[in-house]
């Protein structure tokens, strides 16, 4: 089940069925879930979740028009619209799944056109638990720019896990035989994917979600460790700290 919020966008597109493509076993599972009686419902985006529910934030990074939004569409609603222009406002997708038999709420954040200004607002990175970096296999410059995006990410979130997607391999299959210095140097898992035909899209997002969950449960950054302790205190102690009190602690 998923929900989405488009800020300053003109419409919310309805999900459509994928057509005329070979599906992996994992993609068949996604189709089955997608056709359940309530999974077509568009949910109201609500930043709050039920008490005790694990919530993670996964952000997408990369140059404009590399296919970040298309990959999200393929994973969440099994659709692909090749003629759609680049998104131009912040897009949030809320997705519910299970990881190791535990219910997990995933908030996917899409840059939505802001990347054309070569920098993103700090709030985009705030409290992210994992990052999916994307480049276009048909445009070398988008690969070269990964270093700049990675540097900006690490200035705000130095420790969160990152995965990288080489998108549009349907248009350049030779890319799958190449090694990439950027991912090897930074020890980042690389996935050869296609938003157009669905290749490896499910695996990319499932692995990113799992990495986000593992990081939230075992953060390596001290600020994330502090926030985790505060969340535990909220769940187990009375009275709990207010949002303003948490902010005061973090600024001390």
Image (tube, helix red, strand yellow):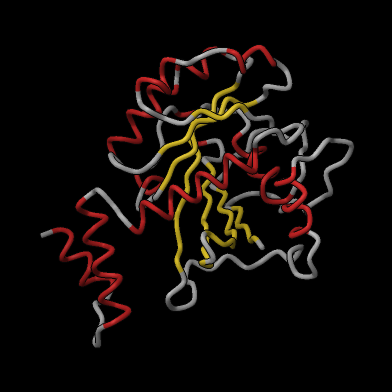
Frontmost residue, 78 versus 173: 173
Relative side of 107 to 245, left or right = right
Q: Is residue 40 above or below residue 91?
A: below
Which residue is depicted at the point 59% across and 59% down? 95
Task: Point out the residue furthest to the left here.
Answer: 252
Residue 23: image x %, image y %? 79, 40
Frontmost residue, 251 versus 206: 206
Frontmost residue, 251 versus 29: 29
Q: Is residue 25 above or below residue 197?
A: below
Which residue is depicted at the point 70% across and 42% down? 74
Which residue is depicted at the point 43% across and 50% down? 212
Relative side of 25 to 9, left or right = right
Which residue is depicted at the point 29% across and 73% down? 232
Q: Is residue 52 above or below residue 119?
A: below
Q: Quadrant of the N terminus?
A: bottom right
Q: Is residue 103 above or below residue 215?
A: below
Residue 185: image x %, image y %? 35, 20
Relative side of 234 to 197, left or right = left
Task: Point out the residue furthest to the right here.
Answer: 20
Q: Report the label total.
A: 0
Q: Quadrant of the C terminus?
A: bottom left
Residue 196: image x %, image y %? 75, 32
Relative side of 227 to 214, left or right = left
Frontmost residue, 202 versus 26: 26
Residue 62: image x %, image y %? 50, 30
């Amino acid at each position: 089940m998923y929900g989405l919020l488009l800020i300053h966008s003109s419409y919310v597109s309805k999900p459509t069925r994928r057509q005329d493509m070979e599906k992996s076993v994992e993609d068949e599972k996604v189709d089955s879930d997608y056709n359940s009686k309530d999974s077509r419902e568009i949910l109201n985006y609500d930043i709050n979740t039920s008490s005790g529910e694990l919530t993670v934030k996964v952000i997408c990074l990369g140059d404009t028009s590399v296919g970040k939004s298309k990959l999200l569409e393929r994973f969440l609603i099994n659709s692909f619209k090749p003629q759609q222009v680049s998104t131009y406002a912040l897009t949030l997708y809320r997705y519910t799944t299970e990881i190791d038999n535990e219910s997990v709420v995933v908030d996917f954040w899409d840059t939505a056109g802001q990347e054309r200004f070569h920098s993103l607002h700090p709030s985009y990175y705030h409290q992210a638990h994992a990052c999916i970096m994307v480049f276009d296999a048909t445009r070398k410059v988008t690969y070269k720019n990964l270093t700049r995006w990675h540097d900006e990410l690490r200035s705000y979130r130095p420790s969160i896990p990152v995965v990288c997607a080489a998108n549009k391999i349907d248009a350049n299959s030779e890319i799958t035989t190449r090694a990439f210095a950027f991912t090897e140097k930074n020890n980042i898992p690389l996935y050869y994917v296609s938003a157009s035909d669905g290749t490896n899209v499910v695996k990319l997002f499932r692995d990113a979600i799992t990495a986000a969950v593992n990081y939230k449960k075992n953060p390596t950054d001290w600020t994330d460790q502090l926030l985790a302790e505060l969340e535990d205190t909220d769940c187990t102690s009375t009275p709990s700290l207010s949002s303003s009190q948490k902010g005061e602690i973090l600024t001390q």
